[in-house]
Amino acid sequence: MAYNELIKNFGRIRDYMREFYLYGFKSREEFTKKSARSYDDEKRRLESWLGDCMRFRQTPEGKNVFISIDSRLSRRNPLYAAWKARSFTDGDITLHFILFDILYDPALSLTLSELTAEIDLYLQNFDEPRTFDESTVRKKLKEYVNEGIVIAEKRGKTVYYRRSADDLPEIGNLLDFFSEAAPLGVIGSFLLDKMPPREDLFTFKHHYITGAMDSEIACTLLTAIGEKRCITLETVNRHNDRISENHVVPLRIMYSTRSGRQYLMAYAPRFKQISSYRTDNIVSVRIDEVCERYDELRARLEQMAPHLWGVSTQSASGQRILEHVSFTVRYEKDEMHIHQRLVREKRCGSVEKLDVNTSRFTADVYDAGEMMPWIRSFICRITDFQCTNRELERQFREDLRQMYALYGLEGGEEK
C-alpha cells in the first residue's frame, strides 16, 4: 500500500530521491543532511512509490539498495509517482472542488461576486464552515485561467468565469509516447491517468527516466525562455555539496539521446560566454527581468550550433577555438553498415567515401574531447587519426599502445 502522507515541498523530495537512488544509495550513517528520523521517514515514503522497481544486494559493507527497471516489462516511468503525491493545503483542496462543482456546466458563467456568494451558500450548512474572501477566490481563479481550465470573459467592465470543456480527444497513442520520451512527460502521465486503461503500443530500448525529477525546473526554464527573461540559478557541486548562484540568460534546453541528461545552454554575463548547466544540478530557478539582448544572444548560439558536438562550448584548455578532427576507417565488403553508421551519427561533421571499403570523417568542433567515446567505438577499423588538439591526439595513441600491451600484442603504432 502506498505511503499516504502527501508532500508540499517537492524540492525536498527531489533532493532525497536523487541522493537515495539516482546518485547512489546512502546508508543511514552516510546521510548527514538531516536527522536519522527524517532519513527513515523519507526512505519509507520513496520505497512505497518505487517498491516494484527496487532491488537489494548484500555487500560486505551492508545492504545495497538500487533501482532496476526492465523496459521490456515496465513501460511507464515510475518516478512520476513523486509528482502525483504532491499535496495542497486544506483550503486549496476545499476551494478547488467547490469551484468546479459550482462551475460543473461549461455553459454557466458567473462573476467573482456571484462565485463568492455561491461558495458561502455551499458551506452554510457546516457547523464550522470555512470562509473564502473575494481576494482568495480571485487568486485561485487567476491560477486556473493561466492553466487554461477556467475561461475568463469580459463583458463591459465585468469579468465572467466559466469552466472550459475538458473532454480529452483520442490522443492516447500520442500521450503514450510523449509521457515517456518528452522532457515534460509528466504532463502526459497525468492526462493518461484520466483515460481508461489501454494496451501500450511503445517499448523503449533506452528508457531515460531520471529527467522526471527535473520537470519543474525545466518548466520554469522554458517559461523564462519563452518570455526572453534573465534568471538566477542555484546550482550544486556534487563533489563538495557547495551551492553557487549564477545570473544567466537561458537560451535553449538540450537533451542527450545518449545519456538522457538535460542541459541548459545559457549566456553568463559575468564570464561573457555561453555555457551549459546540467538541469539535475540546478537546485532552484528565479525568473528575473526581461533581457534586451535576448535575440542577439540566441543568434550567437545558433551560429555556434554547427560546431557543437555535445554541449561544451570550449576546449579543455578553456579556449574558445575550433578543433579539427579527422579519422579514416576501413571495413570489409560485408560491413557497409559502418559507412551508414558514420553518416547516421555524424552530427555536425561530414563523411566522405574514399573508396569501396574506406570512409573519412571530419569535423570542426569547440571541444573534440566530447567526441572521443564515439570515436573509440570504431577502434580496430581506424587507419588514421588526426586532431589539432595535440594532447588529445597523444592520449588517444597512448591508450591504444596500452591496450596492445595489455593483450601482449605488438603494434599500436597507427598513423
Image (cartoon, helix red, strand yellow):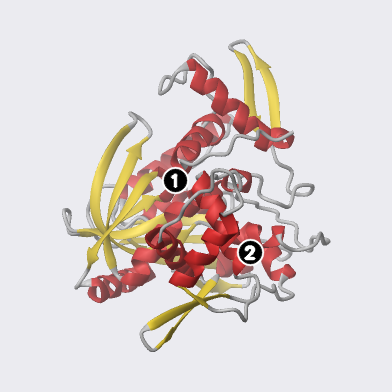
Pick whichever, 48 or 70, lies toward us. Answer: 48
Q: Disc 2 residue type?
A: Asp
Q: Quadrant of the N terminus?
A: top right
Residue 4 x, y percent position in the rendering = 65, 35
Q: Amino acid at mark 1?
A: Asp
As drawn, 7 above or below 105: above
Which marked residue is nearer to the observer: mark 2 or mark 1? Answer: 2
| Label at residue 280 | 1
Label 2 to label 1: alpha-carbon separation: 39 Å
Marks 2 and 1: CB-CB under 8 Å?
A: no
Q: Is residue 85 above or below residue 135?
A: above
Tell me which residue sits at (62%, 81%) in the image: 107
Which quadrant would residue 56 be assigned to in this image? top right
Given the current orientation, which residue lies at the most extreme top position? 60
Above-or-below relation of 279 to 167: above
Which residue, given by chain and number where applicable, does mark 2 sit on? 101
